[in-house]
């Protein structure tokens, strides 16, 4: 059995080949600067909208990587409420949603504060408000006291993917990690975000929730890199897209003797893809802002505002009158009246390829 990285002496003196990562690192730094620059030319409301959209995606996708699906509207409402952003139709949110949001906002909004044992325990307790993970009771708000294996497969045919640092070493390893994390090292914060993610995952200090906390730690360090609490790109969204490679690369590098080039390379490419995806999201947000600016004096009812915002945020499938009725919780007749009114105002139009049912789309403006 190959040794794990933490079984080598001085295992945290990580090394990497600069020449292998320089090009992608440069691209990432360039894209970050470009996006923050673009955002700074925008109005306050647009920046708020972009931050709200990004943080919502980050929370949802980070949970989805672990196989947990959260409600988009609940997450968005919870973040808006905590950041004091005014949005229509705030809804009640579950405790588990509140917990994930609390952790993510503490990481990104308080990125200048040191990361401590106490702060990490707070995040962990927020993630597991009932003291259970699914059906299992777990140790909450403290480091694990039991050994940790990551296994898959049916009982009797289990495959061990990873055995984490022994429980009696966790506290010592975490102290070492936090000391490094909070020090003003000469390492660029983007690389520090990548190293911290890997280092934390290797220690695996909690009974559960290690992946989500590792991604929150990366987000905290990326906020340091951008020097702003405003978030415009979501690393977790991209990790979800590349989830298979994410686990494969972690599994490969966990057996390295200290060289983590492959992990840094993967992380930086993932971050680059996330930044490129953000450019598309920004176009959407700009279009939405532009629309509401043009129509600031147009009369709309609440149902129309609700569905129009959904269309701008990215809509699943086609807009039909039946779907309108469902989203706006109204009768089919009311939905048709709403749609006809928007067509008269030249805001909606019928899609060209008709077919049996009529679909509607936003008209050019």
Image: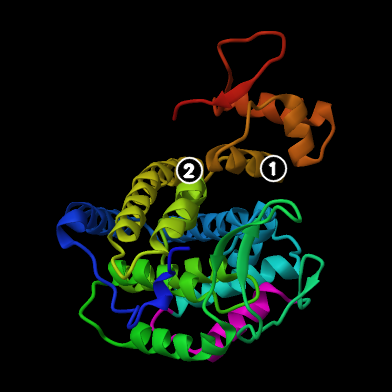
Residue 66 is marked as none
Asked if residue 136 lies left or right of residue 12, the reply is: right
Q: Is residue 117 magenta?
A: yes
- Spatial separation of the CA atoms under disc 2 and disc 1: 17 Å
Whole-percent x, y for residue 213 in the image = 54, 71
Residue assigned mark 1: 301
Question: Where is residue 304, by image quadrant?
Answer: top right
Q: Residue at x 35, y 78 (%)?
A: 11
Whole-percent x, y for residue 104 in the image = 54, 70
> Visible in this render: residue 129?
yes
Crowdedness near tag 1: few (<14), some (14–19) or many (≥20) residues, C-alpha within 10 Å: few
Q: Residue at x 69, y 65 (%)?
A: 97
Q: Are marks 2 and 1 in contact (CB under 8 Å)?
A: no
Q: Residue at x 59, y 79 (%)?
A: 123
Element type at mark 1: loop
Give the farthest residue toward the left. Answer: 19
Name the image quarter holding the C terminus.
top left
Q: Residue at x 36, y 82 (%)?
A: 181
Magenta stretch in the rendered image: 111-129
Question: Where is residue 90, by image quadrant?
Answer: bottom right
> Visible in this render: residue 344?
no
Element type at mark 2: helix
Whole-percent x, y for residue 92 in the image = 76, 64
Asked if residue 8 lies left or right of residue 293, the reply is: left
Question: Where is residue 361, by image quadrant?
Answer: top right
Residue 288 is marked as 2
**Looking at the image, is mark 2 or mark 1 earlier in the sequence?**
2
Q: Nearer the viewer, residue 301 or 60?
A: 60
Nearer to us: label 2 or label 1? 2
Q: Is residue 11 magenta?
A: no
Whole-percent x, y for residue 204 in the image = 54, 74
């Amino acid at each position: 059995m190959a040794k794990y990285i933490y079984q080598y002496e001085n295992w945290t003196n990580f090394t990497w080949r600069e020449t292998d990562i320089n090009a992608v690192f440069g691209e990432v730094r360039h894209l970050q600067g470009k996006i923050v620059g673009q955002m700074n030319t925008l109005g306050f409301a647009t920046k708020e909208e972009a931050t709200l959209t990004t943080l919502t995606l980050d929370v949802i996708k980070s949970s989805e990587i672990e196989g947990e699906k959260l409600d988009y509207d609940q997450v968005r409402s919870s973040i808006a409420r905590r950041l004091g952003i005014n949005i229509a139709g705030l809804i009640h949110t579950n405790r588990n949603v509140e917990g994930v949001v609390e952790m993510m906002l503490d990481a990104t909004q308080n990125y200048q504060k040191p990361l401590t044992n106490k702060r990490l325990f707070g995040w962990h307790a927020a993630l597991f408000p009932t003291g259970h993970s699914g059906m299992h009771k777990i140790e909450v708000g403290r480091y694990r006291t039991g050994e940790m294996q990551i296994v898959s497969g049916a009982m009797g045919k289990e495959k061990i993917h990873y055995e984490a640092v022994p429980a009696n070493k966790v506290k010592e390893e975490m102290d070492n990690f936090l000391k490094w994390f909070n020090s003003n090292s000469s390492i660029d914060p983007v690389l520090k975000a990548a190293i911290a993610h890997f280092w934390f995952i290797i220690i695996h200090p909690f009974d559960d929730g290690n992946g989500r906390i590792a991604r929150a730690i990366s987000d905290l360090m990326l906020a340091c890199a951008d020097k702003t609490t405003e978030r415009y790109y979501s690393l977790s969204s991209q990790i979800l897209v590349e989830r298979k490679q994410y686990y494969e690369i972690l599994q490969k590098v966990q057996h390295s003797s200290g060289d983590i080039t492959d992990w840094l390379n993967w992380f930086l490419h993932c971050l680059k893809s996330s930044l490129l995806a953000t450019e598309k999201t920004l176009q959407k947000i700009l279009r939405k802002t532009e629309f509401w600016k043009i129509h600031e004096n147009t009369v709309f009812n609440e149902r129309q505002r609700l569905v129009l915002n959904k269309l701008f945020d990215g809509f699943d499938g086609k807009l039909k009158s039946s779907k309108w009725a469902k989203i706006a919780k109204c009768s089919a007749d009311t939905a048709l009246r709403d749609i006809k009114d928007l067509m008269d105002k030249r805001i909606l139009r019928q899609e060209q390829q008709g077919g049996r049912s009529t679909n509607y789309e936003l008209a050019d403006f």
